[in-house]
Amino acid sequence: MVLGCSSSKLITNWQNPDYKHFNPKKILVVGVTPNYEARKAYEFQLITALNARNIKALQSAVVFEESFQDSWQTKKEIKDQVDKLLSNGYDTALVSLVKGIDDNESYAADSPKTDYHLRKFIGYYLAYQDAYFTQDDYNKYKVYNIETSVYDLKKDSENTLAWRATFDLVDPENNSKAISTYIAKLLKALEKNNIIPKKID
């Protein structure tokens, strides 16, 4: 699983009790990364999924002016930007960023769940006993710790955080597939917490 395909796992999940049934109408999607192409790809895939649920959503790569993204902002400048978003009908901001990267090591052999012989200890031990004798057959990979937060832009208070969750994303070889995997896991968590409605097929 680790080496063959991208994998995402929900680690923590917190919801503000004041937002048990949040109903965002227009969401600004923000991917925080210096990699512009990765940010565009992530934001575009996510707004497409939100649009499919009849939620208006736009990406920060389109909404924010380049000067705002590429320089440090004061509290007043950020507030002015939020006021501008409110005047254009935005009521919610969804922000995702990489909080950390862990280095990991994995034994390189595969572990197919469909193999009947691996369902018993005897078969499993037989298949992987070479791990006791082989010391150099390991692969290194990274795990990205990603945090996503949902903020209410309209509420005027000190606590407008509606929901926050953290995920672990195994370092992928295919960035597009990894983004899709993460977004699928994120949408499922948002649906489960009634932040967004489920997609109607």
Image (spheres, rainbow, N blue to C red):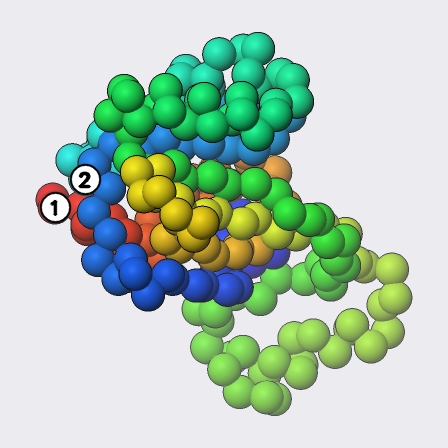
In the displayed structure, 66 sits above or below 171; it is above
Asked whether residue 43 is in view, the answer is no
- Where does label 1 land, which residue? 200
Q: Measuring from the top left, give residue 134's x and y in whole percent.
A: 85, 68
At 61% from the left and 61% from the top, the residue drawn is 110
Task: Say which residue label 2 marks.
Answer: 53
Query: Residue at coordinates 29% horizontally, 57% vertically from top-left?
Result: 19
SS at mark 1 in the image: loop
Q: Amino acid at mark 1?
A: Ile
Amino acid type assigned to the residue bearing label 2 in the image: Arg
Q: Earlier in the sequence, mark 2 or mark 1?
A: 2
Q: Quadrant of the N terminus?
A: bottom right
Quadrant assignment, res 137: bottom right
Residue at x 24% of width, y 52% of height: 22
The answer to whether marks 2 and 1 mark residues whose Cβ atoms lie closer than 8 Å is yes
Q: In terms of depth relative to the viewer, which is nearer, 189 or 126?
A: 189
The one nearer the camera, 165 or 124, is 165
Quadrant where the C terminus sits is top left
- Can you give x and y, in whole percent of width and height, for residue 126 in the image? 67, 81
User: In the rendering, at what x and y percent does residue 111 appear?
Assistant: 58, 66
Q: Is residue 61 above or below residue 11?
A: above
